[in-house]
Image: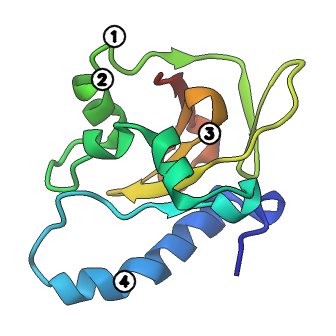
Amino acid sequence: MPYDLKAQTPKTLAEDYAGKFEDLHRAVGDTVLRMQPWVTFHEHYRCTCAEIQGALGYIPMMLDPRKVEGARDQINAAYPFGGWQPFKGFTLEGVALSYAGDPPIYPYAFTMLHDDLVLVYPHAWVAIIPPGDADKFEVARLD
């Protein structure tokens, strides 16, 4: 069943992610996955998973669950064009990302890295939301 993105919050996405991938993590046991699973919202955008994967680019490969660092630090180390450089002025309502004067945008996909919720939006915007505190999110452009 497709997500209703307008009804989602960072908390509901994190809870759903835990539910979806609990069996996967149980199946691999002590083995740590090299890359986190991602949930795509291709139905919302009426496109294919391959098109969403194209929009994600190399971002999934920058996040390694075997490392102890959080998403921000891993992207900062792996992104070759200046690392993680947060932009100020964004607001987050549910999972809709807005900037003053622009219409809200909804994520293409999300994952959880350790406890960080990572959402990838159109126009190469990436939001990282720390556990339990959606008010302390950061947004950077990774294009």
Q: Position of residue 108 (x, y in %)?
A: 61, 49
Q: Return the mark for residue 79.
A: 2
Dot 4 or dot 3: first in sequence order is 4
Q: Between 108 and 129, which is closer to the camera in this rendering?
A: 108
Residue type at mark 3 is: Tyr
Left/right placement of residue 75 relative to residue 136 reads left
Give me the disc on residue 115: none
Q: Secondary structure at mark 3?
A: loop
Residue at the location (70% across, 65% down)?
A: 43
Compared with 137, 96 (above or below) is below
Q: Which residue is mark 1?
A: 82
Residue 17 point in image, percent of width and height = 49, 71
Choose top left, top right, bottom left or bottom right for residue 72. top left
Instruction: Quote the CA–CA distance across marks 4 and 1.
Output: 35 Å
Callouts 4 and 1 close, C-beta under 8 Å: no
> What's the amino acid at mark 1?
Gly
Q: How far apart, in angstroms, are the residues tagged by discs 3 and 2?
A: 17 Å
> How would you rate the neighbour count of disc 1 (Cα within 10 Å): few for under 14, some for 14-19, many for 20 or more?
few
SS at circle 2: loop
For disc 3, the marked residue is 121
- The Cα–Cα distance between marks 4 and 2, rounded to whole angstroms, is 29 Å
Residue bearing the label numbered 4: 22
